[in-house]
Image (cartoon, rainbow, N blue to C red):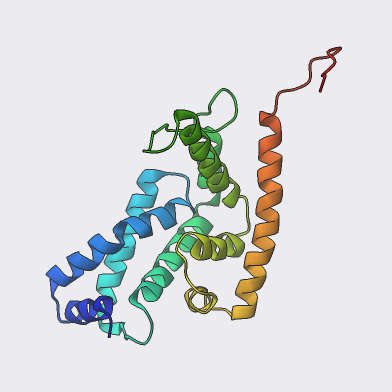
């Protein structure tokens, strides 16, 4: 039994200190996962809190047959999908109302990391935001499967358990999601390219 499972067994016996350890360990990954699904930080934080409340309330039903993180993200997935399906219009409006950057419809926070130039950090931030927004354009199952695979690094088998479908279906969702994501990103990038000036000849 791994450490997470041992801690969860203690949580089943109402050990709140063990629960705090698990929550501190997984709070950031769960929050990041949810934020890739919904457009608002405050909403993502509320949903993340709800996930851990559900974990604690369901502690007696936990069985260490799979990784604790698989069980955790199954609850996070169900919680997030329930919110998305109930608030589709609100989520879409929130995306439309977000402040943009020079008319691009995106807002970037610039940070400098060691070893990178300021320009490299800006470009990295822009691409991360572009991918995050493009992910939201995908169908729910493709978006969820891609996020669990790319960002949370779950195996196909674990994603199948989380999303309650076959491994073959997960591979299909991920393959289609990658193709669709590429097309969405290309469409989002085109408006950012400078328009040609009429009558101006571009020399190579």
On the rendered structure, is 198 left or right of 149?
A: right
Name above or below for residue 47 compared with residue 12.
above
> x and y percent of residue 138 in the render?
63, 55
Whether residue 34 is visible here, answered yes or no, is yes
On the rendered structure, is 62 left or right of 76?
A: left
Residue shown at the point (45%, 29%) measured from the top left:
118
Name above or below for residue 191 compared with residue 76.
above
Residue shown at the point (53%, 26%) measured from the top left:
101
How many marks can you see? 0
Q: Quadrant of residue 112?
A: top left
Whether residue 107 is visible here, answered yes or no, is no
On the rendered structure, is 93 left or right of 22?
A: right
Seen from the viewer's position, the closer of residues 162 and 66 is 66
Residue shown at the point (18%, 65%) measured from the top left:
20
> x and y percent of residue 204 in the render?
81, 23
Name above or below for residue 90 compared with residue 152.
above
Seen from the viewer's position, the closer of residues 120 and 84 is 120
* Quadrant in the picture for the N terminus: bottom left
Seen from the viewer's position, the closer of residues 122 and 71 is 122
> x and y percent of residue 184 in the render?
68, 47
Name above or below for residue 171 compared with residue 83.
below
> x and y percent of residue 61 in the render?
30, 83
Residue shown at the point (38%, 48%) measured from the top left:
43
């Amino acid at each position: 039994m791994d450490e997470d499972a041992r801690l969860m067994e203690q949580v089943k016996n109402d050990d709140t200190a063990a629960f705090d350890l698990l929550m501190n360990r997984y709070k950031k990954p769960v929050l990041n996962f949810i934020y890739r699904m919904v457009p608002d930080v405050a909403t993502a934080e509320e949903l993340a809190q709800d996930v851990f409340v559900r974990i604690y309330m369901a502690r007696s039903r936990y069985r260490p047959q799979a990784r604790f993180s698989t069980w955790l993200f199954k609850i996070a997935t169900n919680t997030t999908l329930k919110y998305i399906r109930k608030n589709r219009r609100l989520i879409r409006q929130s995306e439309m109302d977000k402040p943009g950057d020079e008319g691009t419809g995106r807002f970037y926070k610039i940070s400098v990391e060691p070893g990178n130039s300021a320009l490299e950090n800006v470009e990295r931030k822009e691409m991360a935001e572009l991918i995050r927004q493009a992910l939201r354009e995908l169908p729910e199952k493709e978006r969820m499967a891609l996020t669990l695979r790319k960002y949370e690094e779950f195996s196909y088998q674990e994603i199948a358990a989380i999303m309650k479908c076959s491994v073959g279906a997960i591979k299909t969702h991920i393959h289609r999601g990658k193709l669709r994501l590429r097309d969405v990103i290309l469409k989002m990038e085109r408006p950012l390219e400078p328009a040609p000036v009429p009558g101006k000849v571009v020399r190579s």
